[in-house]
Image (cartoon, rainbow, N blue to C red):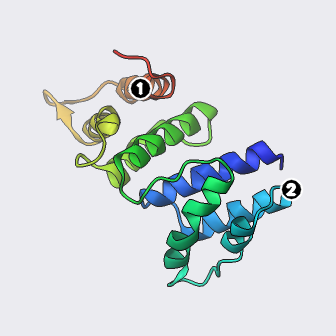
């Protein structure tokens, strides 16, 4: 893995952990990848050495993650922060556009991890999750929705993901 790829993986793992979508183990693995890629500093070594045993690893992660990211010129987002939620939504939108997740994965993720109480940036995705549910479960005027209705929702999700990634308004 190239150093830039390892840094991206660590940043993304940290962001997703901050919104409850990622695990401490994913952050620790990403820190290990950074070391293997030739990036090295004392706090990164501590982060990479956090035990993967369930329980206390989140406390250790909270203690060291901010400093480790700062030493690598990466951004630390506190758990539950709006800025972290915004970045997590963009990460997941990029994953859709890269083909690593499906449109339904993205809307389900936004509904489950960001929710209506979270960042407004996810509102369009959450609305589209509702649209998927309607297409899958509701009969309209006594007839199922047309067969292409799910494809239209998927196209809307892809368009929303592009808007989120590029920052385009509208």
**Above or below, comparing residue 60 to residue 30 in the picture:** below
**Above or below, comparing residue 54 to residue 35 in the picture:** below
**Left or right, 108 with reference to 7:** left
Residue 139 image-quadrant placement:
top left
**Left or right, 67 with reference to 4:** left
Q: Could you tell me residue 124's position as x and y percent?
A: 31, 31
At 50% from the left and 60% from the top, the residue drawn is 17
Label 1 or label 2, whichever lies nearer to me, is: 2
Q: Could you tell me residue 154's position as x and y percent?
A: 43, 29
Residue 43 visible at all: yes
Q: Could you tell me residue 30's position as x and y percent?
A: 69, 60
- The residue tagged with tag 1: helix, strand or loop? helix
Measured Cα–Cα span from mark 1 to mark 2: 37 Å
At 27% from the left and 35% from the top, the residue drawn is 127
- The residue tagged with tag 2: helix, strand or loop? loop
Classify the position of the C terminus by image quarter: top left
At 13% from the left and 27% from the top, the residue drawn is 141
Residue 102 visible at all: no
**Above or below, comparing residue 7 to residue 141 in the picture:** below
Label 2: how many Cα within 10 Å (few below 14, some 14–19, many 20+): few
**Above or below, comparing residue 87 to residue 21 in the picture:** above
Q: Could you tell me residue 37's position as x and y percent?
A: 84, 54
**Left or right, 35 with reference to 73:** right
User: Who is closer to the viewer here, 35 or 127?
Assistant: 35
At 77% from the left and 59% from the top, the residue drawn is 33
Residue marked by disc 1: 160
**Left or right, 45 with reference to 109:** right
Counting residues from the start of the chain, the first of labels 1 and 2 encountered is 2
Residue marked by disc 2: 38
């Amino acid at each position: 893995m190239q150093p830039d790829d390892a840094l991206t993986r660590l940043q993304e793992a940290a962001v997703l952990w901050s919104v409850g979508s990622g695990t401490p183990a994913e952050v620790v693995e990403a820190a290990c990848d950074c070391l293997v890629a030739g990036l090295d500093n004392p706090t990164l070594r501590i982060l990479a050495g956090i035990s993967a045993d369930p329980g206390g690893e989140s406390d250790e992660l909270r203690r060291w993650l901010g400093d480790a990211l700062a030493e690598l010129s990466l951004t630390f987002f506190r758990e539950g922060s709006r800025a972290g939620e915004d970045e997590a939504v963009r990460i997941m939108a990029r994953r859709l556009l890269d083909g690593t997740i499906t449109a339904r994965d993205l809307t389900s993720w936004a509904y489950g991890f960001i929710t209506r109480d979270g960042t407004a940036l996810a509102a369009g995705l959450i609305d589209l999750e509702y649209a998927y549910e309607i297409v899958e479960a509701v009969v309209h005027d006594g007839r199922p929705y047309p067969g292409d209705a799910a494809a239209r929702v998927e196209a809307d999700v892809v368009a929303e993901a592009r808007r989120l990634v590029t920052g385009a308004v509208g």
